[in-house]
Structure formats: structure tokens, C-alpha cells
């Protein structure tokens, strides 16, 4: 019996709450999961779990065994890291989740550069405008722009995510240019369905101001809002990682530079520091270096 794999199966079944969920997560069949558990129980000499049709519960022996299995798996991971060649190129597969807007605006180019440097790595990119469950959907790494991260996950700060208020020159010629944030309430504002839908928050000279906004176009991702703004449909609050090129070209005009929209943190989110594959660690280091505290896309915008 491969005892380490049996321990890994046992820990995964406990963490996910069922053998079927563990089978999906580990890429194994249900019979293989059951066989590993049975062989681990034979080796330990005790029943580890009570299995019913509705739930799994640990026996007293299972409660004693679980932390020791976690410790053994951690030690095995440390051993592998200690003897691995320090200059060995990363290889293997990574499943990465990211929002559509950041994925297309920034992450795809970053991943292209990464796999060019490390051709032994294969990346499966999931661009989704929803918060994914990393365990259930077998995601190794999620890129999220948020100041509120699930405390059960590990977050590594990659950079800052700033936003700007902007509109096309044609819209401003027709409707005028707001001089104060309060005037936004009189304009057609293009709003994000999940972020600041009816209320935009600003810092103006150290004072927090919340401005109610409304408009006739709302969308669940920023790329759609930028296209609507470019089509002169209204005023939008857009992330600079996406809008920077249009601002530099003059297709969009930055408004109200004295008012700073709320800044968010660009995070790399994953499930655990323990047993972290070398490829995942390499990807984290690469992205942190590429995006940096002052991202390249903000240069020259006067933020």
C-alpha cells in the first residue's frame, strides 16, 4: 500500500466531507478511494470513519489519526522541497481562475510570458465573473481584486487596483463635464452589477464621499462598461488595468482627478501554504514581480 497516498485520500475525504467529492478532487474513482481508506484502516488497525448515506463522521481512532496524517504529509512535502534541485525548471499543470476583464487585459500576457520561460508548465485558465470555490472546482490559484478575502484562504498581495471616472469626448461635448463628484448624480452612469452598483465611493481631500448614481446600462464585468463608455453611452468607473490604453490615446477622458475611487488589492488566492507545489510557488513569485506594488499600467496617468 502507498501509505502516503492513503493518508492524502483520508485527509481529503475528511476535508471535503464525502468520498465522491474527494474522488473528483483527486482525480480518482470511488472504488480506489474506498480501497485506500480500507487499506489505511487495516494498517492502523482501527476503523477511522463511520460512513452513512448522509454524512461521514470520525471515530475516536480517526480523530487521533487525522492530525498525524496531516503532519506526515507536511513532512513528506518538506522532504521533497529540501532535496529538489534548486535550479529545476517548474513543470506540471496549474488551474487558474480570474475575472474576464483582468484576465484579458493583463493576465493572459503574463501567462504567455511565464510559459515561454517555463515550457514544461501547462496552464488552464478559467475566466469567470463569479467567486469560485477553489476546492470544489479544483482551482490551484485565483486572482481576485478585493479588500475582503475569505479567512479560510491564503492571499498574497500582488499589486494595487485603482479605478478612474471617465467618459468619451463625444459624451462630454453633448452632456457637459462634471466639476464635482456630486454632479455625477445628474449624468448617465454606467454601473457594475456587483461593485458600486448604485453608490460610488470617493476620497476627496481626505474626506469620504458617497455619491448615488444611476444609468441605463449595467453589466457584470468591466469590459462591457468600457465599450459602452467608448460608444458615448455614459460615464463609467473603470479599473486602470483595463482603461489605461484608452486614457492615453484620448479615446476616454479622465474626470474628477481630485476624487479618488476606492482602491482594491490585487490578490493571488490559494488554499494552503502546506504542500505547495513548486510550480505554484514559481507562478506566485512571477506574478508578484510582474505586477509589482506600482503596476506598469498606471504609469503616466498621474494617479
Image (tube, rainbow, N blue to C red):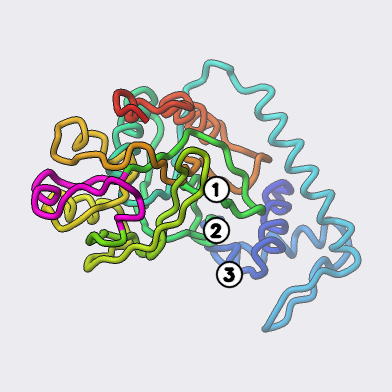
Q: Residues within 10 Å of mark 3 (few under 14, many from 20)?
A: some
Q: Residues within 10 Å of mark 1 (few under 14, many from 20)?
A: few
Residue named by callout 2: 25
Q: Look at the picture and state if 257 lies above or below 20.
A: above
Separation of marks 2 and 3 at Cα, in angstroms: 9 Å
Disc 1 is placed on an element classified as loop
- The answer to whether one can see residue 194 in this image is no
Residue annotated with mark 3: 20
Q: Residue at x 58, y 66 (%)?
A: 21
Which residues lie in the magenta part?
A: 165-184
- Residue 166 lies in the magenta-colored region: yes
SS assignment at label 3: helix
Examine the rendered structure and indicate whether residue 162 appears above or below residue 289: below
Work out how far the residue at label 3 is from the one at label 1, CA to CA, in angstroms: 34 Å
Q: Position of residue 67 (x, y in %)?
A: 83, 52
Q: Position of residue 303 (x, y in %)?
A: 37, 30
Q: Which residue is mark 1?
A: 147
Q: State the residue lying farthest toward the bottom.
A: 53
Mark on residue 41? none
Q: Secondary structure at mark 2?
A: helix
> Which residue shows up at 33% across the image and 37% down it?
257
Q: What's the distance in space between the residues labelled 1 and 2, CA to CA?
A: 28 Å
Q: Could you say where residue 156 lies in the image, as x and y percent from the top left?
A: 57, 37
Measured as percent of width and height from the top left, residue 250 is found at 14, 34
Amino acid at each position: 500500500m502507498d501509505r502516503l497516498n492513503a493518508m492524502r485520500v483520508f485527509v481529503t475525504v475528511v476535508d471535503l466531507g464525502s468520498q465522491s467529492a474527494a474522488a473528483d478532487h483527486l482525480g480518482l474513482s470511488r472504488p480506489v478511494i474506498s480501497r485506500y481508506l480500507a487499506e489505511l484502516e487495516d494498517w492502523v488497525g482501527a476503523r477511522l470513519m463511520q460512513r452513512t448515506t448522509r454524512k461521514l463522521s470520525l471515530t475516536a481512532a480517526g480523530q487521533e489519526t487525522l492530525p498525524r496524517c496531516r503532519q506526515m504529509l507536511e513532512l513528506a512535502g518538506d522532504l521533497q522541497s529540501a532535496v529538489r534541485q534548486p535550479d529545476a525548471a517548474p513543470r506540471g499543470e496549474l488551474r487558474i481562475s480570474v475575472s474576464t476583464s483582468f484576465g484579458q487585459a493583463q493576465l493572459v500576457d503574463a501567462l504567455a510570458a511565464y510559459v515561454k520561460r517555463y515550457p514544461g508548465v501547462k496552464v488552464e485558465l478559467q475566466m469567470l465573473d463569479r467567486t469560485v470555490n477553489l476546492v470544489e472546482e479544483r482551482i490551484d490559484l485565483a486572482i481576485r481584486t478585493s479588500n475582503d478575502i475569505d479567512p479560510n484562504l491564503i492571499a498574497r498581495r500582488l499589486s494595487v487596483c485603482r479605478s478612474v471616472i471617465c467618459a468619451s469626448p463625444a459624451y462630454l461635448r453633448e452632456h457637459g463635464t462634471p466639476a464635482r463628484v456630486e454632479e455625477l448624480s445628474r449624468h448617465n452612469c454606467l454601473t457594475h452589477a456587483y461593485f458600486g452598483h448604485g453608490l460610488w465611493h470617493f476620497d476627496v481631500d481626505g474626506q469620504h464621499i458617497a455619491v448615488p448614481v444611476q444609468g441605463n446600462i449595467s453589466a457584470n464585468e468591466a469590459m462591457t462598461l468600457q465599450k459602452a463608455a467608448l460608444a458615448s453611452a455614459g460615464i463609467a468607473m473603470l479599473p486602470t488595468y483595463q482603461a489605461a490604453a484608452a486614457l492615453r490615446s484620448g479615446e476616454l477622458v479622465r474626470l474628477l482627478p481630485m476624487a479618488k475611487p476606492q482602491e482594491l488589492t490585487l490578490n493571488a488566492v490559494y488554499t494552503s501554504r502546506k504542500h505547495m507545489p513548486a510550480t505554484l510557488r514559481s507562478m506566485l513569485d512571477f506574478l508578484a514581480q510582474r505586477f509589482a506594488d506600482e503596476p506598469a499600467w498606471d504609469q503616466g496617468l498621474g494617479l
